[in-house]
Structures are given as structure tokens and as C-alpha cells.
């Protein structure tokens, strides 16, 4: 079976997140793209080998040639178009974050409940062998009982005109970057945290966080820190899980195909390995999505996981004295 993809929008992430892995996957065909600006869509299609350019998102969802859609639209549009796509009979791979807030995430899940469509949030890193290796070590008890953890994702993006700084588009450091830090901790600790406190650096004293650090407590008294920043001098994407016998330190967890390392320290002795550097997280994600479509099986990042992530994000904002991102009104 070939899964025929349509793309909503001509976002900058799409060449890495979908185009390249699709061209490398014999079970995927890129058949259509639609964007607010048709000229932009035509340029995108010509550059990336997409067969058709359609006039609107609705036209793409109505196309019988499309089996699945990829949604890399601004955060504020994820929920509405996920529901519209699923109700149009399309499988959905939607970029993170799943929605603007937890309430909207629950609304999406309720709206697509019972439909025979795969709906998956694109936390691509989750599918890479680097994360599987860390999970394996924790399951084996390699570092003893976990006592603390931390995860950070920082980049350098000072351009305030970027959509990540836009309140109306559900922007913010935590929405774009911190969601990865939160998700990694939830994934490796296999439980849900309580947000104890959080501190944010606000943009011009408003509701957008250019950086945020959240202090969490997981079941069993495990203390953790999740942080992110849009304004660091260099990119950092790392996580550390500390136990009674040692630690697991991961570098490059968000984009492990760009270079990664996993350092296991047990009783004072350390070993470092690079895990599957030739495997792209985007390719692994697409393969998992296609398998779910073909086999009707579950996805790792399911609806419950997506809601739980948004609940923690909302709690981080509230703890930092900020508002959870507001959902743009939409109806079907």
C-alpha cells in the first residue's frame, strides 16, 4: 500500500520533516500541497517534487487522491485542521504542539473519537533508536532507582517577527521548544508530573516567554527540571536522568541524526556511544505513521499522550504567572 500525502501549507520545516523522508520511503507518495498563497505553493511543489497544487486547504481535504495530510501550520491552527482533515477521511500527522492548550486538545480528541483515522502528533525524536536505547537502560534498572532528571532545548532565534513570538498564533518558547523537554521527561520517566514552580523571561513584559524553566515532581518524589530558550548563544538539546547508581546523559535528543551521544555512568564508570546516527528521526516517524495507517495499529504518541503534554505546558505557564495559550475560535 502506498500512502498518498497532501501538505497543508508550505512551512519551512516540511522539507526536513516530510519531504526528504517521503522521497526515501517507497510506501509514501507526495501528491498535493495547498497554501494560503498559491504562488508560494507552486514554488514549493516545483522545488520538492509534489505532484499537484490545489487552491485551498478545503480542496486538498476533498481530494480523492489524498490519503493522509501533514499539518505544519502555526500552532493556533493545528487543532482545527486536524479535526477537519480527520472528518474528511484523511489520516493526520500534525506538528507539535497538538493544540493551543489542553482544553482544545481534549476538544480535538473528542471530535475525532470513533473515526477510523490515524491521528498522530509529530514528536519525531520519540521514534529514534537513541530514545529507545535510553528507555531500555532505564527498564533494565541500569542506574538504580531514579531520583532526578532534567531536559533542556535552547536555540538562538532573536528575530521577534518570527511566529514563535506571536501570541495570536500560540507562540512561546515552551510551546515550540519546551514541549520537547517536557515530553522527553514524561517519556523516560513513564509518568505524569506535578508542576511545582516555574520562572519565565517575558518578551517586553507580555505573555510570550522567550525562555522558561519549570520545576516538576514525578511520582516517587523524583524531582525534574524542564527548560527552553529562544535566545541562547548556541543550540543545546540534552537530557540527564540520575539514579542511585549513576546516570544516563543524552546529547542531541531532538535531532539525533545531526549528531548524538548517550553516556551511561554506573558506579563511577562511564561509557559513551552514538546511537544510530544514520537513522533520521523524521524518517523513523514517517515509517511508524505509515505502518499505523497500513496496519490499523496504535501510535506511540497517541491522543492521551498529546493531551497530557498540553496539560503540563498549561501548568508551566500558570506557574510562571503567564496565561495558557488561547485557542482561536473555530467551528465545523
Image: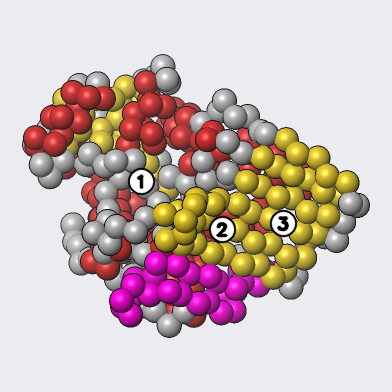
Residues at marks 1 and 3, CA–CA distance in whole angstroms: 29 Å
Look at mark 3 in the image and give the residue it sits on: 241
The residues colored magenta run: 193-219
First along the sequence among labels 2 and 1: 1
For label 2, the SS is strand
* Mark 1 residue crowding within 10 angstroms, few (<14) / some (14–19) / many (20+): many
Q: Quadrant of the C terminus?
A: bottom left
Where is residue 146? Give x, y as percent. Answer: 78, 61
Outermost residue to the front = 233
Residues at marks 3 and 2, CA–CA distance in whole angstroms: 12 Å
* Mark 2 residue crowding within 10 angstroms, few (<14) / some (14–19) / many (20+): many
Q: Quadrant of the N terminus?
A: top left
Image vertical order of residue 117 relative to residue 15, above or below:
below
Where is residue 202? Give x, y as percent. Answer: 38, 75
Where is residue 287? Give x, y as percent. Answer: 48, 29
Image vertical order of residue 33 relative to residue 245, above or below:
above
Q: Nearer the viewer, mark 1 or mark 3?
A: 3
Name the residue located 60 percent from the left edge and 52 percent from the top edge: 238
For label 1, the SS is strand
For label 3, the SS is strand
Look at mark 1 in the image and give the residue it sits on: 94
Q: Is residue 218 magenta?
A: yes
Where is residue 256? Give x, y as percent. Answer: 56, 38
Q: Main secondary structure of the magenta part?
A: strand
**Residues at circles 2 and 1 in contact by the CB criterion of under 8 Å:** no
First along the sequence among labels 3 and 2: 2
Camera-nearest residue between 176 and 237: 237
Name the residue located 43 percent from the left edge and 82 percent from the top edge: 321
Look at mark 2 in the image and give the residue it sits on: 152
* Mark 3 residue crowding within 10 angstroms, few (<14) / some (14–19) / many (20+): many
Amino acid at each position: 500500500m502506498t500512502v498518498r500525502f497532501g501538505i497543508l501549507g508550505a512551512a519551512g520545516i516540511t522539507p526536513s520533516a516530510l519531504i526528504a523522508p517521503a522521497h526515501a520511503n517507497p510506501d509514501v507518495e507526495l501528491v498535493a500541497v495547498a497554501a494560503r498563497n498559491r504562488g508560494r505553493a507552486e514554488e514549493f511543489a516545483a522545488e520538492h517534487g509534489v505532484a499537484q497544487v490545489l487552491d485551498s486547504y478545503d480542496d486538498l481535504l476533498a481530494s480523492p487522491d489524498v490519503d493522509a495530510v501533514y499539518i505544519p501550520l502555526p500552532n493556533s491552527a493545528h487543532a482545527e485542521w486536524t479535526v477537519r482533515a480527520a472528518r474528511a477521511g484523511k489520516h493526520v500527522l500534525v506538528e507539535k504542539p497538538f493544540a493551543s492548550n489542553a482544553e482544545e486538545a481534549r476538544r480535538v480528541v473528542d471530535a475525532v473519537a470513533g473515526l477510523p483515522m490515524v491521528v498522530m502528533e509529530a514528536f519525531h525524536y520519540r521514534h529514534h533508536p537513541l530514545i529507545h536505547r535510553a528507555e531500555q537502560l532505564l527498564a533494565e534498572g541500569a542506574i538504580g532507582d531514579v531520583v532526578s532528571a532534567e531536559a533542556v532545548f535552547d536555540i538562538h532565534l532573536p528575530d521577534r517577527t518570527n511566529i514563535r513570538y506571536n501570541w495570536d498564533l500560540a507562540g512561546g518558547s515552551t510551546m515550540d521548544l519546551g514541549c520537547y523537554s517536557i515530553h522527553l521527561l514524561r517519556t523516560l520517566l513513564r509518568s505524569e508530573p506535578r508542576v511545582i514552580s516555574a520562572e519565565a523571561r517575558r518578551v517586553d513584559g507580555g505573555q510570550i516567554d522567550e525562555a522558561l524553566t519549570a520545576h516538576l515532581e514525578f511520582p516517587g518524589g523524583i524531582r525534574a527540571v524542564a527548560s527552553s530558550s529562544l535566545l541562547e548563544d548556541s543550540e543545546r538539546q540534552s537530557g540527564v536522568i540520575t539514579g542511585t547508581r549513576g546516570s544516563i546523559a543524552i546529547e542531541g535528543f531532538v535531532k539525533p541524526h545531526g549528531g548524538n551521544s548517550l553516556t551511561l555512568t554506573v558506579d563511577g564508570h562511564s561509557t559513551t556511544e552514538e546511537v544510530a546516527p544514520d537513522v533520521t528521526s523524521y524518517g523513523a516517524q514517517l515509517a511508524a505513521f505509515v505502518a499505523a495507517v497500513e496496519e490499523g495499529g496504535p501510535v506511540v504518541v497517541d491522543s492521551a499522550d498529546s493531551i497530557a503534554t498540553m496539560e503540563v505546558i498549561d501548568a508551566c505557564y500558570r506557574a510562571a504567572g503567564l496565561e495558557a495559550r488561547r485557542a482561536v475560535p473555530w467551528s465545523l
